[in-house]
Amino acid sequence: MRPMTEADLADILRAADAPLVIRGGGTRGIGRAMGEVLETGGLAGVRIYEPGALTLVAGAGTSVAEVEALLAAEGQRLPFEVPDRRGLLGRGGDSTLGGVVAANASGPRRVQAGACRDSLIGVRFVDGAGVVVKNGGRVMKNVTGLDLSKLMAGSHGTLGVLTEVSFKLLPIPEQAVTLRLAGLSDAQAVEAMAAALGSPFEVTGAAHGPGQGTFLRLEGFEKSVRYRVGQVSRHLARFGAVEEVADVWPDVRDVTPFHERAGDVWRLSLRPSTAADVVARAGAEAVLYDWGGGLVWLLTAPGLDLRARLGAIDGHATLIRSDSALPTFAPESPGVAALTKGLRAKFDPKGILNPGLMG
Amino acid sequence: MDMPLPDASVLARRDRILAQLAAVLPGDALISDPTETRAYECDALTAYRCPPMAAVLPRTTAEVAAVLRICHAERVPVVPRGSGTSLAGGALPTADCVILGIARMNGVIETDYADRFIHVQTGRTNLSVTGAVEHEGFCYAPDPSSQLACAIAGNIGMNSGGAHCLKYGVTTNNLLGVRIVTMTGDVLTIGGPWSDAPGLDLLGVICGSEGQLGVVTEAWLRILPKPEGARPVLMGFASNEVAGACVSDIIKGGLLPVAIEFMDRPCIQATEAFAKAGYPDCEALLIVEVEGSPTEIDDQLARIKAIAERHTPVAYRESRSEDESKRIWLGRKSAFGAMGQMGDYICLDGTIPVSELPFVLRRIGELADDYGLRVANVFHAGDGNMHPLILFNANRAGDLEKAEAMGADILRLCVDVGGCLTGEHGVGVEKRDLMHAQFKRDDMEAQLRVKDVFDPAWLLNPAKVFPLDVTAGRRAG
């Protein structure tokens, strides 16, 4: 099914009585939702783009590539550096804004510019009973009523089907420079990234690939970037020499080192200072640190129950790619699980939106 | 503005309820003497007052949970309160309610500079969070103008902003996790010193929920390294339109100032008479502040100057020192005090798309003429968050009602041009009955369903945010 309007979508959901798999471009969905596919690609089109107000409103089915090109022509971009998951998940297709929001997909710049949900300023969606709901709007500052936009971000299509999304934008900086520290252990790398992120020099990327190096990004006006390159180098002198290297951020963002490699892919949200210890206990075949250690990608043997192996951690692990029956998302505490169950019952009373995906 | 009648059955059980509360709280944590509960009769929206049945001032999350369990069992409405600085009446009591004040829970639990967070009890004031980390070169970014007094609990409740949120975002963008007590007394931890929840983003809906969903007793807050320096520039323009166009061009020019503040002629004149900051005599004034090292600041200010000159400013004053920066901010920071000296005022905070600025200011001027009231405008121009101040005389019969009616017209105007009723103050009771202007029934119903899940008996701050007619079937009593 591929509705072309919000009203058509509402009709479909009102009438539906069997599970549906909600799909934008089909590039980044995770987990094992089963049912008839409901595609949102027909709900496309930029509604409002005001460069002078740094805001964009577009249909949820609008292609990310199209939007990024439109914004780039005005020297602007989505702040959170949209990851491309096709290589990691072995998919084709064209990513949509709605899919990005449903996954709260956020790239390396999150450490400075926030996640997708932080740039999201409004949504329209149709809930599982076919009711159209608007929340938020097209202005950056809005505390009117409950913030359901945040609730929809990262809900993986389980509370409603997005039809329109609004974002706050940022200018594309004049210059971006990538710095590399070589030869650091994971623990030293996390410490170096923390020192960089805790400095006033506005680091917009902090990643580490064991054996590859520790990478930092500075962005801004040219004069400013030159100044901060010098300052960061001095600030990190105790970790060794800093060299300028070519752009690595698309590879960090898309976890390129794991492409074409067999095994399960885990995504860990961690308290950064604990990351190296967690990785040491994980026994993974490949590792990539992003967000200064706040995000760790692990490639493990197929079927390895990483959660059981690690036990309690300061954070949680999501299973991004696997053929095993392990749950995709880490279990919630009983009290929190009761609330999310209650919310699902309210927004998807028929239990038809990606049922079972999030529990 | 109407509030529901107090529940007679609750009032009839007053002694029994107080005895139960006394049994779970230290002697000084329960206030029920009518002369003492008067202290909690209002927040910063002082036009409306009502002493609560009792106020409790717990010191621990366990005490908060014990109070809520009792109030849930006895079906007593609970109004959470931080420091009582809400401009929207978010902490306004009803006669049958218990005020749950969090002010005594003001400790720092943990500070971690490597992981860049601070874990605090939420009674702590906003400014003292920065105070706890600034010796290490860090700060907590959201800076509402009440930051000396306002509590983190209230900041989370209202999703507070401030002058610097154009760059750093508002509370929700700087909140990592909370410990929250639900109305049934269950203590939940949501989020923590890492990114994202494993499931739904409950943190996102709790932040800004105005005490509707639970009582937040602890918070993990993102702390940021303080910038090396900051300097403002002040510019005057011949019209609101030109100033608005300049704001738009600065943003389109790829600059991201930390603040862009806008004042119109009535506001400039009022603050000048009051604070004597030496502001130019002009129709509209912008204060633009940028951050960084001295070189970076010079570079950004040079770019801003080139943009401003295209709009032929009638005044242009760049700060060269700490002292000059203070003087540039002096008028802006005294704006509310200046208006207060001229009379009573209502402060609105609707947000509009920045492109609608000139039209909205013109329309506000026409409304002021129609109502025969004076209005001054001061606002965060970068993000379109307006603060029209409507002057009135509280001692003149009907004047408050007239000012409120005009305020409602302005807020409806904000919604009509694509904006919203409130950008950072919250709905509270003040804008509660205007919610119909922004939300259709289904849009509102979706929000009510969230409250149904967190607070099925509708006991937490029950007469706020949503129009009473919409919630009548859900509220107790």
Image (cartoon, rainbow, N blue to C red):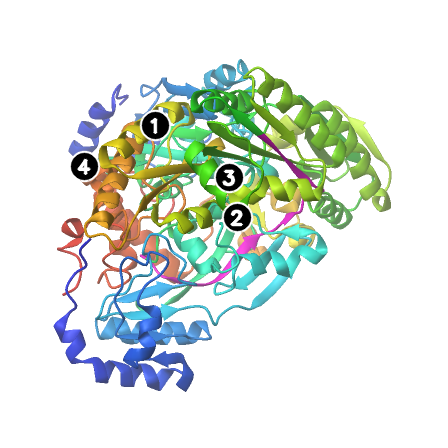
Residue wearing tag 2: B142
Q: Amino acid at mark 4?
A: Asp
Of callouts 4 and 3, the N-terminal one: 4
Judging by the rendered image, the residue that carries numbered circle 4 is A17
Given residues A347 and B92, the one toward you in this image is B92
**Percent x, y of residue B307:** 59, 19
Which residues make up the magenta segment? B212-234
Residue receiving disc 1: B360
Q: Are marks 1 and 4 on the same chain?
A: no
Q: Which residue is mark 3?
A: A320
Asked if residue B222 is among those painted magenta in the image, a careful observer would answer: yes
Real-space Cα separation, disc 1 to disc 4, in angstroms:
47 Å
Is there CB contact under 8 Å for labels 2 and 3?
A: no
Distance CA(mark 2)–CA(mark 3): 34 Å
Expressed as whole percent of the image width and height from the top left, the position of residue A258 reads 62, 32
Q: Nearer the viewer, residue A4 or A317?
A: A4
> Is the residue at mark 4 from the same chain as the one at mark 3?
yes
Which chain is indicated by disc 1? B
Residue type indicated by callout 1: Val
Is label 4 or label 2 in front? 2
Mark 3 falls on what kind of element?
strand
The reply to whether residue A311 is visible in this rendering is no
CA distance separating discs 4 and 2: 46 Å
